Amino acid sequence: MDFSKLTEQFAAIASENDLLRESYGQMAQAILAFDDKGWNEIAPATLEDGFALTDLKHASKKIREISEGNPLLKRGAALRTSYVFGKGLSFGVLQPRFQRIVDDAINQDVVFSPEAQAINERTHFTDGQLFLLGNIATKQFQRIPFGQIGGVVTNPDNPEEIWYVKRSWPRLSQELVGMNIKEQQLDVWYPADTYKPANGRYVSKIGQFPVDSRSRMFVSRVNRRAGRTFGTPDALPAIPWAHAYNEFLKDGSRMLKALSMFAWQLKSKTKTGVQNAAAAIASPPAAGSTAVLGADMELSSMPRAGSVDLTDGRPLGSMVASALEVSVVALLSDPGTSGAYGTAQTLDVPTLKAMEARQHIWTSFYRRILDFIGVRDVAINWPKIESEPSQRLMQALALAHETGAIWDDEYREAVIETLDVPRLHATPPPQMGDGSQDAIPSQGNSGAVGSMQDNANDLEQADSNPTA
């Protein structure tokens, strides 16, 4: 290797190391400045009621762009969605006329299908609010992008109470024959579904734009504070830390690649000795060869282990997890240096509580949707987020069945779902058991007294019994 090129490469690495040191020295300021490739500082409005609408729309647009490509934000959004809607929800038995509205293809695509539920939850993640427009006559819903919201009218005495929502959008009409597209800009105000005028009549116009009282705007807002009109995106506090973690990994990878260029370090007291040694090892022999050096020369291997530790960026990932209210173990798909499963379970408890709180928000929103359809006193049911072992579920189901808490067909459906048994018959068997043995195994006791039941550990012992 040419000595001049070797010197240039060492100088380049030293210069890059200085730049990295300076960069990490300013990391805190970079995070607080919130400046990354086109990001402008997202500052609250001069008013005391929180973020301005224009700031929120600008922020949500950037968050949507970044969350599509940033692995941590994409993973965080998927985790939150799977926690909240992973097992779906049910509305009980609806009357046929209401069930037809729920099963409508458009309503399924916007509100009720698993895909619609995932989209709507991700909208909370990126926008902090969701807008659905419901037609009173057809009972069909339409999802309105946050970017089309042009303003709101609120209660003069309460900025949290929305009365009207303005939608501004370009209506595109296409001529199927000539394939020409015409664009017409529209601005329309819609009454909020929660607004009930004192005189029972909505205004016909706000400013110069009309009010469409044939539809209702459903608004769902999250992460609000007292006195604020709009919510804030779930991902907003995680953005700078996700960027910092991403930059840390890129800079660390760059340093590892730079260090991998050199395997050996040659030291000499004189410049001539360095030049002679460089010429001697320019074409190294095969592996296992011997290096013959002068008395004033020293050959040593370059350090590898511990030179750059990418796991040092884990605290940055933890900040992203904290902002998104998910476990850092699940977010990074890495249990960390301890690798303790118990740690992941402990961190998962507050996550479950946060996701249950979000489910309560969705429960209120769906009640408004179903009330708009005409359903009264609906029972919205959420399955448990955490998954119980099959043994515990079977014991609980057997206990519920024997105590008469559930019907035979309900018991059968739950057992089939728990054990993942193919459904070969439409009705339950004529007899659920022969009555000779209690279907509920007790917890058992390995002490001197023993259990009060003979079949204490039937399910567990059956696994350890030898088979023929």
Image (spheres, rainbow, N blue to C red):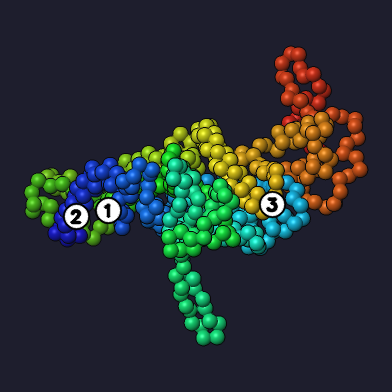
Q: Point out residue 41 in the picture as x, y percentages from the top left corner.
A: 30, 50
Observer-nearest residue: 250 or 265? 250
Q: Name the residue under label 2.
A: 12
Badge 2 amino acid: Ala
Picture quadrant of residue 467: top right
Q: Point out residue 333 in the picture as x, y percentages from the top left corner.
A: 48, 45
The structure residue drawn at horizontal position 52% and vertical position 57%, both measured from the top left corner, is: 203
* Label 1: which secondary element: helix
Picture quadrant of residue 147: bottom left
Picture quadrant of residue 136: bottom right
Mark 2 and mark 3: span between their CA atoms? 71 Å
Name the disc covering residue 258, or none: 1
Q: Mark 3 points at which residue?
A: 374
Ranked by sequence position, the earlier of labels 2 and 3 is 2
| Tags 1 and 3 touching, CB below 8 Å | no
Badge 1 amino acid: Ala
Badge 3 amino acid: Gly
**CA neighbours of label 3 inside 10 A, class few (<14), some (14 to 19), many (20+):** few
The structure residue drawn at horizontal position 87% and vertical position 29%, both measured from the top left corner, is: 437
Can you tell which of label 2 and label 3 is closer to the viewer? 3
| Tags 2 and 3 touching, CB below 8 Å | no
Can you tell which of label 1 and label 3 is closer to the viewer? 3
Mark 1 and mark 2: span between their CA atoms? 9 Å
Q: Point out residue 291 in the picture as x, y percentages from the top left corner.
A: 22, 50
* Label 3: which secondary element: loop
* Label 2: which secondary element: helix
